[in-house]
C-alpha cells in the first residue's frame, strides 16, 4: 500500500497527522529516519514530492519554531 503526504495548514483533514519544521534539513532527516510512516502509523511507502515542494517554497519565509501539520492521504 502506498500513500502520499499532504500539507494540512488549516488542520482540518481527518485522520492522524504529524508535525514537521518546514526546513529542507528537517525534511531530509525525517525521510532518512523513515519518521513519516512511523508517526502516521502507515504501512508501505509515503510519497513526499508535494511536501518537498511545499518545504522548498516555505522555508525561506517561515519563522523558526513554526511547524507544518501533515496528513497521510
Image (cartoon, rainbow, N blue to C red):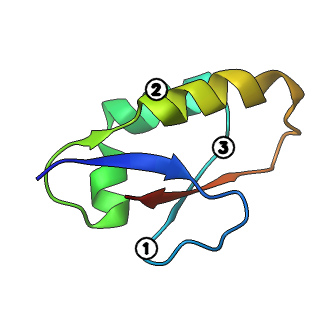
- Dot 3: within a 10 Å radius of its alpha carbon, few (fewer than 14), some, or many (20 or more) residues? some
- Dot 2: within a 10 Å radius of its alpha carbon, few (fewer than 14), some, or many (20 or more) residues? few
Q: In the structure shown, which secondary structural element does the residue marked by tag 2 occupy?
A: helix
Look at the picture and state if 51 lies above or below 5.
above
Relative to 41, is 19 on the left or the right?
right
Relative to 58, is 8 on the left or the right?
left
Residue on which the image places disc 2: 28
Relative to 52, is 69 on the left or the right?
right
Q: Between marks 2 and 3, how big is the CA–CA gap?
A: 11 Å
The location of residue 50, given as percent across then percent down, is 49, 33
Q: Which residue is painted at 28% across and 58% down in the image?
A: 38
Quarter of the view holding residue 32? top left
Q: Which residue is painted at 52% across and 36% down in the image?
A: 51
Residue on which the image places disc 1: 16
Residue on which the image places disc 3: 21
Q: Earlier in the sequence, mark 2 or mark 3?
A: 3
In-front residue for pair 17/10: 10
In-front residue for pair 70/66: 70
Q: Earlier in the sequence, mark 1 or mark 2?
A: 1
Q: Between marks 1 and 2, how big is the CA–CA gap?
A: 21 Å
Q: Earlier in the sequence, mark 1 or mark 3?
A: 1
Q: Between marks 1 and 3, how big is the CA–CA gap?
A: 17 Å
Amino acid at each position: 500500500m502506498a500513500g502520499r503526504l499532504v500539507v494540512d495548514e488549516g488542520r482540518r483533514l481527518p485522520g492522524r497527522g504529524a508535525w514537521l519544521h518546514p526546513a529542507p534539513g528537517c525534511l531530509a532527516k525525517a525521510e532518512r529516519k523513515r519518521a513519516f510512516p512511523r508517526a502516521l502509523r502507515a504501512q508501505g511507502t509515503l510519497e513526499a514530492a508535494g511536501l518537498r515542494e511545499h518545504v522548498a517554497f516555505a522555508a525561506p519565509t517561515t519563522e523558526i519554531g513554526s511547524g507544518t501539520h501533515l496528513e497521510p492521504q
